[in-house]
Image: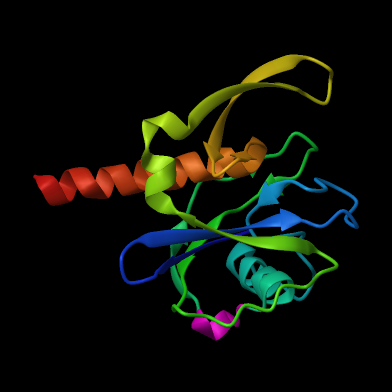
Amino acid sequence: MLVPLYHDGGQWRVLLNVRSQHLAEHKGEIAFPGGSMEESDADAQSCALREAWEEMGIRPEDVDVLGALDTVLTRTGFVVWPIVGAIPYPYDFKADPREVAEAVHAPLRAFLDPASLRRERRAERDGAAADRVAYAWAGRLVYGATAVILTQLLDAVRDIRRVDAA
């Protein structure tokens, strides 16, 4: 899964998407571009770059890979390997409508605002309830594995800010 970031002149943004209603899993949810590994993928990074190309039209050669975040297990049993990458701006995104209903260009600072943080109670696969982190922004709710990955990214940004301030 690629966590694409870009700087639009005044601020950093994170690119998410609203998943198509045509998909088997996570229909209509806000997510990062990503999907299952294929035999042709050498590793998680190759998979993330290929999926970002297929879903959003982001050419792999246009991604400056910054590093990986910790793996995340989704409520549906998928293991996700998030790869953070910077892309140029402006960019001519070409989202595949079979997979992406809408591209979401969210300012990173909106999620850094403590007012965006939510706690959501969600059902696990076994039916048990679990409290999870979520983020509200512009009438949208980012939850599940996407919110967990976003939390990791925000923690990294906060750590960089602390180092820069010291």
Residue 12: horizontal and vertical position, in percent? Answer: 37, 61
User: Quick check: 89 left or right of 2?
Assistant: left
Residue located farthest toward the left when viewing the structure as drawn = 166
Decide whether residue 59 is among the magenta residues. Answer: yes
Q: Indicate whether 47 appears above or below 58.
A: above
Task: Look at the picture and state if 1 lies above or below 62.
Answer: above
Q: Residue at x 75, y 34 (%)?
A: 75
Q: Which residue is depicted at the point 70% across and 45% down?
A: 79
- Residue 112: image location, x then y, percent: 38, 41
**Quarter of the figure with the C terminus:** top left
* Residue 6 inside the magenta-drawn segment: no
Which quarter of the rendered picture does the N terminus lie within? bottom right
Q: Tell me if 32 is positioned left or right of 109 in this view.
A: right
Classified by dominant secondary structure, the portion drawn in magenta counts as helix
Choose top left, top right, bottom left or bottom right for residue 37.
bottom right
Task: Please provide percent x and percent y for residue 133.
Answer: 55, 28
Q: Position of residue 30 (x, y in %)?
A: 67, 48
Q: Residue at (42%, 45%) from the top-left corner?
A: 110
- Tell me if 160 is positioned left or right of 82 in this view: left
- Choose between 51 and 121: the one closer to the eye: 121
Residue, far front: 139
Residue drawn at 46 percent across, 34 percent down: 116
What colour scheme does the image use? rainbow
Chain part drawn in magenta:
58-62
